[in-house]
Image (spheres, helix red, strand yellow):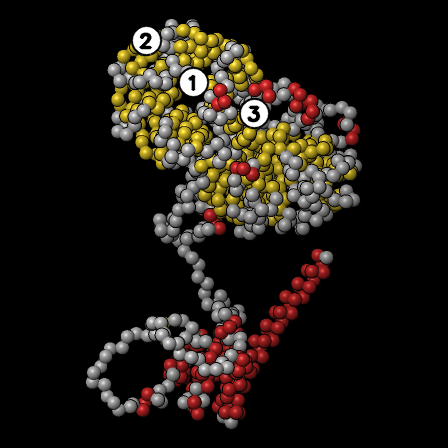
Amino acid sequence: MAREGSGLFAAFRVLGRFSGHVPHVLRYHGRHREFYLATAVGRSVHTYNVSTRLPGNTLPQDITCLAADRMLIFASYDNILHAFARNKEVVHTYEGHKARIHLLQPFGDHVISVDVDNVLIVWNIESEEEYLQIDFDKATFAVSALLHPSTYLNKILLGSEQGTLQLWNIRSNKLLYSFPGWGLAVTTLEQAPAVDVVAVGLVSGHIIVHNIKFDETLMKFQQDWGPITAISFRTADGHPVMAAGSPVGHIALWDLEEKKLMCQMQDAHSTAIAGMTFVPGEPLLITNGADNALRVWIFDGPGGTGRVLRSRMGHSAPPTKIRYHGQNGEQILSAGQDGTLQSFSTVHEKFNKSLGRGSINKKKSKKKGLKLDTMALPPITAFASEVAHQSDWDGIVACHQGYITCTTWNYQKTSMGAHKLRPEEFSKHKPIDIYATAVDITSCGNFAVIGMSTGQVDVYNMQSGIHRGCYGKEKAHEGAIRGVAVDGLNQLVITAGSEGLIKFWKFKTKDLVYSSELSSSPSGILLHRDSGILGIAFDDFTISVLDIETRKIVRTFSGHHGRINDMTFSPDGRWLITSSMDCSIKTWDLPSGCLIDCFLVDSAAVSLTMSPTGDFLASAHVDDLGIYLWSNRSLYSLVSLRPLPADYEPSLVTLPSTCPLQDVDVSGDEEPCDEMIEYVSPEQLGEELVTLSLLPESRWKNLLNLDIIKKKNKPREPPKVPKSAPFFIPTVPGLIPRYIPPEEENDTQSKVVNLGVLAQKSDFCIHLEEALNTNEYKAPLDLLKSLGPSNIEVELRGLAPEGGGSMEVMLSFLRMIGMMLNKKYNFELAQAYLALFLKLHLKILSSEPKLLEELSRLSMHLEETWIHLRALFNQSLCVLTYMKSALL
């Protein structure tokens, strides 16, 4: 049995993905008069106007090549080429290659593509037809670079891995000229500002500035950082500068007038420079790399070097731990394998923050640079954050992989904090086999609790960094600490050890309160502070839920087939969501103890966190740089939370793309099933239960005070008829608006008045008279429930003989009240109706023996019911008072 995707969570979008290994594309929009930057991120295309990202579109697979002309953006995956219009619509698809496309070149009304099998195809953009196909021999000319020289009509220049270059006329399909080259593979070709001049990047690090008209080499430069990955020329302010990128992330700037190296921009990216473009007419250089960074450099300082003007960057290595920061659900803290701690905003990218890399000595690290930094700390494995006092001192504490020292971080200053937290006995030397394994921070933000691999648990002050004690005589556990947690009131500290014990300690006195042996060795714990529920993940792939008040296991879940990576609670503590190495994400309902949702993803989720507002679930995955958001469908649609059957087979769900999915109304597409039928509560759950009606209080609460309300609402002056009254369709008076049906015109209407109309009984009286014989009082009761307070009073006044009623009708009304009390439903209506009836007809009731006899029976029934209710109320109040005093 299977269903499509997840019933509870829907893919929304991904955070923290900005760039990949595909070079970016810069294009100018004539009508908007601004430059647009397009980058390929996985399966999506991002479009920026150099400061803001615009919505893009998604392809079925990862994009491998990108290009753009004045109107369209061309993106290819595998052997298929697509054209995007207006940044998001796929308007053309070109299919014909048999191998992966690796080069693209827009060419007027055509676009040229080259695949890895050395096949060049010229496509007509509008008709999507092949205009020309050229096959090259890989052994003699393997195409590695492609360029359309400026002013060269219908001509393209091709570079090869063998080092030779060829100039082709596409229109006539002729090879015009073959350049002998320099005996080294060509990696990139770039048009210089001067006509006929082309810059050729070689695999050896050489840059050849060549005149292709006369086949002359004008200049020759060399970099020692490996092959040339990208070249760009600066055209602003008359500065003849050429920039060249390298595989190690450095950029060299060459002065073309003096033919020498002007300056170097080292560590511009931590990986190879994928793309590099000077903005025409401006001193701006845009670079991107596979380190998931996109940077805009401005050259406005002395020496010709650039500084970062704007940047969009995420993790350059996959994140390992993510947690929501604060209670507004707008910031996610993420620790990655690249050693950085970053904050990603779920609202807008401009609110993203990078807290930097962990370092033993920040000053020495800055001097040595990124590549030679020996002071850098290992990646963060676990961290805890708290917003209380974060503006006064550090509010984040983190432990690092295989490292004994824990670091503090300041969210407000977006940097590593002032304190290094380690045990006093290791302050002078660093042990090799002892390291911190778990951390937690108190809800007040004053203390950090750190667990070690030796079983030691220490407490530190976050403001001063001073050691404030440890739990246990020498150590808290015999095995390594697998998890620590502090409750919301700083009363208890809970620790879990690898030997299979969980212990409860007094936070202040450090005394052991309770110790319990677990069924298996725990791999991690997670505390939901508001509800006092502790989730425990075990090495045998099971999960237990422990109540810290009773200190007993209240739920046990099994079903994962791999190591449990992370857990998270919903804000109300009702759901426990777990992820495992079996690539599944499961949602467990704690009150019912059942699995209510399960789905599979392509790569296992290493970390999960649920928004404090409950709107999103965030996940980080193996070998993936992004943080994926899943929207909680139960907040905006009808979702079945019934337990999944034992034979349920989860389906594979595609990870969200970088573009948020459009809201689609799926209510019409879903077929109604038994699970999704809305539950309608019966009028009475049980015959022995006293049940109230669903009517609002205004319909029955003020029945005894109608005369007072009428006096207060009496108008001071009679209403005036407006001069030109608007047209209204006449309605029937009552609480539910109903239109008066049109009456048929009858020309033969009699002018004699029918006196029987004046003495006509109301529907309520008629139903009561019928009920005397049938003993069925549902019809008169439903009619009375549909009336407003004033109409109810009119109907009850009309039951008396002087109002057109009779003693039999009054007796029938009392029997209707008795029926309501016998069945114990509409209890408050019976009280209100009876009270108004007694107020209106007390004199008549006292003089009629039949009515008095019926009233005495009602009185006894009412007294019995009230004594039973009062006993239940007193019992509940007693239990509540005891619970309040016992807990305090």
Inspect the image, locate mark 2, and give the three-letter code of the amino acid beneath it.
Tyr
Measuring from the top left, give residue 224's x and y in whole percent: 54, 11
Element class at badge 1: loop
- Alpha carbon of mark 3 to alpha carbon of mark 1: how far? 21 Å
Mark 2 or 1, nearer chain start: 2
Q: Write the residue at 69% across / 32% down.
A: 406
Element class at badge 2: strand
- Alpha carbon of mark 3 to alpha carbon of mark 2: how far? 42 Å
Measuring from the top left, give residue 801's x and y in whole percent: 43, 91
Residue denoted by label 3: 300
Mark 3 or 2, nearer chain start: 2
Instruction: Residue lying at the far front in this picture: please name it.
Output: 238
Q: Write the residue at 42% across / 52% down.
A: 675
* Residue 193, disc: 1
Asked whether 206 or 698 is in front, the reply is 206
Mark 3 or 1, nearer chain start: 1
Q: Write the residue at 47% across / 21% down.
A: 235
